Amino acid sequence: MKFQKTMAGKKLLILNKKQIQQRIDRMAYQILEDNLGEEELIMAGIVDKGYVIAKRLKTVLESISEIKVTLMKIEINKDISHLDANADLDLDLVSNKVVILVDDVLNSGRALAYGLGVFLDIPLKKLRTLVLIDRSHRNFPVSPDFTGLELATILKEHVDVVLDEKSEEDAVYLS
């Protein structure tokens, strides 16, 4: 692992582009194993980076299986104390299907809890959660079903996930 200097101090590179893709590939195979016999999956990505990860998972799943993968964008206001979320698809379209809720980092669990809240009134076959990084500092009782990397951190440390599709710079940093 290498250090990169920043204005605020130093950042530790936790995952590079190749390592991120390896974890996405592995989680795609885990999703496939968990959903053998399914014809369709809904990948519900929490904006911004969760949605980017969901798109990448969709690409991998479609290359390794015949499962139809429908992408859904979930926008959540994480800064308020009640559920305020929007989806870019009609929620009736996910009824009686498997939904995978995707985010980049699980820290307090608020984003995943709010994301799960979007689907509370919808009958689903099953609902799974997936995160690239699990920091295990939960205030909400949520745990991911699929995890790219569990990372032991202290609360004052920050995990920064960079997923830039334009410059193709992908990395996970700890600062």
Image (spheres, grey):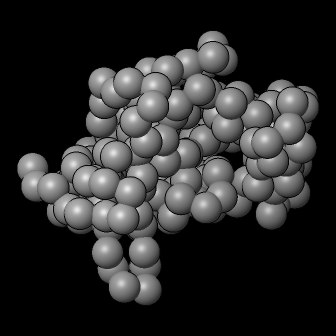
Q: Position of residue 20 (x, y in %)?
A: 27, 55
Compared to residue 73, the image places residue 117 above or below, namely above
Q: Is residue 97 left or right of residue 103?
A: right
- In front here: 173 or 26? 173
- In front here: 134 or 65? 134
Q: Residue at x 31, y 64 (%)?
A: 6
Question: Residue 158 occupies which quadrant of the picture?
Answer: top left
Q: Position of residue 15 (x, y in %)?
A: 23, 52
- In front here: 95 or 173? 173
Question: Residue 68 occupies which quadrant of the picture?
Answer: bottom right
Residue at the top extreme of this rendering: 141
Residue at the bottom extreme of this rendering: 166
Compared to residue 32, the image places residue 153 above or below, namely above
Compared to residue 157, the image places residue 170 above or below, namely below
Question: Residue 161 occupies which quadrant of the picture?
Answer: bottom left
Q: Residue at x 54, y 46 (%)?
A: 103
Q: Position of residue 101 (x, y in %)?
A: 60, 41
State whether residue 61 appears in this view. Answer: no
Q: Residue at x 81, y 47 (%)?
A: 77
Question: How many numbered markers are drawn?
Answer: 0
State whether residue 1 appears in this view. Answer: yes
Q: Residue at x 32, y 45 (%)?
A: 174
